[in-house]
């Protein structure tokens, strides 16, 4: 049971015990419907599709000049877990899908190794997107003006999906999302931060892990903390 739910039950129990102690045998109750947090099939896919339509053939920044495809993001609109990288690479640009190159394969492996509530995750269970939607030339870091032009889109995606946890992949995604350019990935990873009430776990970008496989266990340890928060196990 989630902490907030168990707190509500405790408070309700205490209130009922209080009235019982006063000798009250029955209480008039006005039942109000408290909607569950919307998940799958609750219109999030439509809202994401509308946002994609709004982005259209975006030319709001210079990254539009060299791109083949806008890489909007993909996955379950009702996902508990959202992964955010910095921007599309060559393969992503060609296919128009996030994390489908070698780094993407590594991310997919990580996701499939994770389990929540005793169920192994797949890519289809999570949502994957980037801070900028178009490929920076030669895979350079996205520049400030490009991030500024594009960040509204990732913010809207997060707003629609409202995941339980966000995992940022690499330095740029971390600094951009939290608007904290002083953060260093080596020091920040493994610690929870917060973005508009949503816990954020920074970890290494899978492209970094391909170059530094010895650090894969650190990312796995970050993923374990995420699973723990989501009520899963490793
Ligand atoms: S990176 Fe974002 S703002 Fe720039 S052209 Fe692509 S979609 Fe538009």
Image: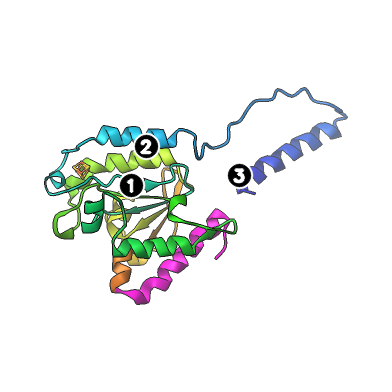
* Label 3 environment density (alpha carbons within 10 Å; few <14, some 14–19, many ≥20): few
Ligand 1 - quadrant of the structure image? top left
Q: Residue at x 34, y 67 (%)?
A: 186
First in sequence, mark 3 or 2: give its number.
3
Residue 214: image quadrant is: bottom left
| Part of the protein shown in magenta | 212-234
Q: Are marks 1 and 2 in contact (CB under 8 Å)?
A: yes
**Element at label 2:** helix
| Residue 161 on image: x %, y % | 43, 41
Residue wearing tag 2:
48
- Is residue 25 placed above or below 159 in the rendered structure? above
- Label 3 close to label 1 by CB (< 8 Å): no
Measure how far apart labels 1 and 2 are at the Cα level: 9 Å
Residue 130 makes an appearance in the image: yes
30 sits left or right of 23 in the view? left
Residue 101, relative to residue 149: is it above or below?
Answer: below
By secondary structure, the bulk of the magenta-drawn segment is best described as helix
* Residue carrying label 3: 4
Secondary structure category for the residue under label 1: loop
Question: Where is residue 96 shown, x and y percent of the image?
Answer: 26, 49
**C-alpha gap between disc 3 and disc 1:** 31 Å
């Amino acid at each position: 049971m989630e902490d907030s739910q168990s707190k509500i039950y405790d408070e309700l129990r205490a209130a009922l015990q209080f009235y019982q102690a006063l000798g009250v045998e029955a209480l008039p109750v006005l039942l109000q419907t408290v909607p569950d947090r919307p998940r799958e099939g609750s219109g999030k896919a439509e809202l994401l599709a509308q946002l994609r339509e709004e982005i259209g053939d975006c030319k709001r920044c210079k990254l539009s000049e060299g791109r083949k495809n806008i890489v909007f993001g993909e996955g379950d609109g009702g996902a508990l877990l959202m992964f955010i990288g910095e921007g599309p690479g060559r393969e992503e640009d060609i296919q128009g899908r996030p994390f489908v190159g070698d780094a993407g394969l590594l991310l997919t492996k990580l996701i499939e190794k994770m389990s929540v509530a005793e169920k192994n995750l797949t890519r289809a269970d999570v949502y994957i997107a980037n801070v900028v939607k178009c490929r920076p030339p030669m895979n350079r870091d996205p520049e400030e003006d490009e991030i500024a032009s594009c960040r509204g889109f990732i913010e809207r995606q997060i707003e629609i999906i409202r995941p339980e946890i966000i995992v940022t992949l690499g330095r740029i995604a971390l600094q951009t999302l939290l608007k904290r350019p002083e953060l260093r990935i080596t020091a920040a990873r493994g610690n929870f931060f917060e973005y508009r009430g949503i816990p954020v776990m920074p970890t290494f970008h899978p492209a970094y892990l391909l170059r530094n496989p010895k650090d894969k266990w650190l990312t796995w340890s970050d993923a374990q903390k995420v699973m723990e928060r989501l009520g899963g196990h490793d």
